[in-house]
Amino acid sequence: MAKYLLAYASGMGLLCLIAGLSPVQALPSLEIADKNIAVNQDDDSYQKNDSHQSDLPNNISSKLLIANETQKNFLSVNQQQKIQDIRVDSAVNLWQPIIPQPASSSPTSYKLAQVTSVSQLSDVQRTDWAFQALQSLVERYGCIAGYPNQTYHGNRAMTRYEFAAGLNACLDRINELIATATGDLVKKEDLATLQKLQEQFAAELATLRGRVDAVEARTAELEANRFSTTTKLSGEAIIAGVGASGGAPNQSDPNIILVNRVRLNLTTSFTGKDSLITGLQAYNFLGGADGQGSLQQSLGLASPLLSASSARTSFEPQFPGLNVNTLSSVGANSVQLYKLLYVFPVANKLTLFAGTAAETSDAFPAITPFYGEGQESISRFGNLNPVLRVSGGTSGTGLASAAGFIFNISPNFDLRALYGSVNANLPEKSAAEAVPGVSTTPLGAGLFSGSNIIATQLTFKPSPALDIGLNYAHSYHEINILATGLVSSDIGALAGVAVGTPLTLNSVGGTVTWRLSPKIALSGYGAAIFVDAASNSVNASTTFTSWMAGVHFRDLFKSGNTAGILFGQPLYRTDTGGSAQLTPTGDNRATPYHLEAYYRLQVSDNISITPGAFVLFNPEGNSNNETTTVGVLRTTFTF
């Protein structure tokens, strides 16, 4: 039972919107389109690949957005939390667009714009001489080209500013005719009418032209001061309070901690279709090689090396405080390059990607709506299928160099694959040992000779309400680990076998999301990891399985808010062979379970607060451990 109440960690933000009047042509049937209303709010599309987060971005963990459709499919946050629900265009909207309705629209169906001036209450009626005079000029000189027959329609009155916009268009057209001195010269009586109209509507014309000048000046200022013509900046900052109780027997409950993670993402396009993604991040999670300073280690649930545990939150890196390539330490809130990836189409249905800091989740859609490190599930278990996490595939630090392709077979069917190498930048393996049998470069060295992975995903959508993803991965590891970061048995995957034993892994999994309605979805996954010793001197094998099922809600209680309830089994040894042990020495074997609930409150377009908790039964597959509760209060800022 939890013994602590979770401390609140949040922040404040201010978003200023500048509004003005659009210098559009006067139209008799108009409605204001509100840009602040979310597009496709009631659409049955449920997948958040872009990011929220993150991901995008998509799916850059918070996931970044990519301009063309193929690249949009490439990044799943994820990052899509979103990103699709909460992000706004960085450009300031200087006015709302005015959109004409069809001529057949009923006069009672008009949407009224906000009155911004007392003079707007003075309407121009169809019976006014000014209205009839301008209508005659429009029909004669084609001043307003927006209507098929260049005439006014509808029965409602016009505001004086709408009338002035039409009058201004006629003035420009007549000036053009005079300047070109064509045969269609302006008649004397028309010039007299225009002069009279100009005098009566002088104030509105002056205001209209002043606003046009202001818009042009503002546009020129924005273009002159933007930092790049090819690059867009987006970011995500997470501040969270985390508390826990339970854990290993005779272990004191840890204190409530306050943690953060900040990411800045630069998306650059050189052709309009390609994208170079550069991501920087800083965080204050601790752990290091032995887990010191981590919440998991304080609970007594972490592995003795690399602090892998089922008590880990979604936004925590897999190897906090550690450069796992060389086992060197990383200081709290030090800036790191966590993403460097180039995406470029080579054919209509084929896109390639390559980079020196990439993750499996960058290329493979998450399928499940629970994905979103800063927006959705609060646990590492609930975010993704474990097969995507094998070999550090979602380390949170861009562990691997990778290259691959996306083949869009059809709009509802695509195949993706990648090859990743963890220590591709190291020419040779270190001779020094961190522990017996394990060098200080535990993941090996070289593009092809160190720890590596080949992963594929087949994604298809048999119906508008159903998304399915099937995964397979083949991995080689220099040491005896799964490298998922999901459970403590991730380290020493072959129990009873030396940690320096190399492994081969074959991992299979599937993820399904079924949308019962636009706002309710059922989602789940299943995974199996088959582990074999790769050393000729060791005969050992183990099978791990995991599954999860849950229900996800959109727009719960309020538009933009989401919630999730999920239950499942974390990775657990179900079979062994050879010299591998099924149950590590000292453990009392029991099937572990994970129960989680969270609710994301969308405070504004750029700020969300997510309270939630998850409960671990038989943590780490050992009934000697107490039932553990982890509570999280996460505040996420996107920009």
Image (tube, rainbow, N blue to C red):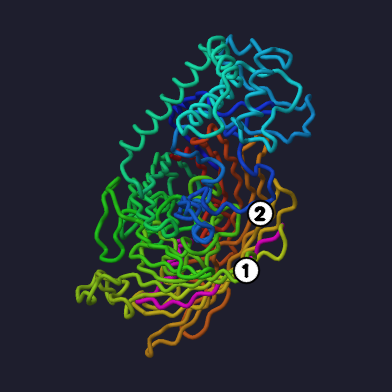
Could you tell whether 140 is left or right of 89 in the image? right
Sort mark 1 into few (<14), some (14-19) or many (20+) by Cα contacts within 10 Å: few
Q: Position of residue 352 (x, y in %)?
A: 44, 69
Earlier sequence position, callout 2 versus callout 1:
1
Q: Can see residue 505?
A: yes
Element assignment for label 2:
strand
Q: Number of marks in the image?
A: 2
Mark 2 or 1: the one toward you: 1
Could you tell whether 437 is left or right of 54 in the image? left
Could you tell whether 581 is left or right of 277 in the image? right
The residue singled out by tag 2 in the image is: 550
Sort mark 2 into few (<14), some (14-19) or many (20+) by Cα contacts within 10 Å: many
Q: Position of residue 205 (x, y in %)?
A: 51, 17
State the quadrant of the N terminus: top right
Q: Amino acid at mark 2?
A: Gly
Q: Can see residue 241?
A: no
Residue 520 among those drawn in magenta: no
Q: Position of residue 195 (x, y in %)?
A: 54, 14
Residue 484 among those drawn in magenta: yes
- Res 639 quadrant in image: top left
Element assignment for label 1:
strand
Could you tell whether 326 is left or right of 9 in the image? left
Front position in the image: 119 or 45: 119
Q: Amino acid at mark 1?
A: Ser
Front position in the image: 152 or 140: 140
Q: Which mark is residue 487?
A: none
- Res 31 quadrant in image: top right
The residue singled out by tag 1 in the image is: 410
Region rendered in magenta: 465-490
* Mark 2 to mark 1 CA distance (whole Å): 29 Å
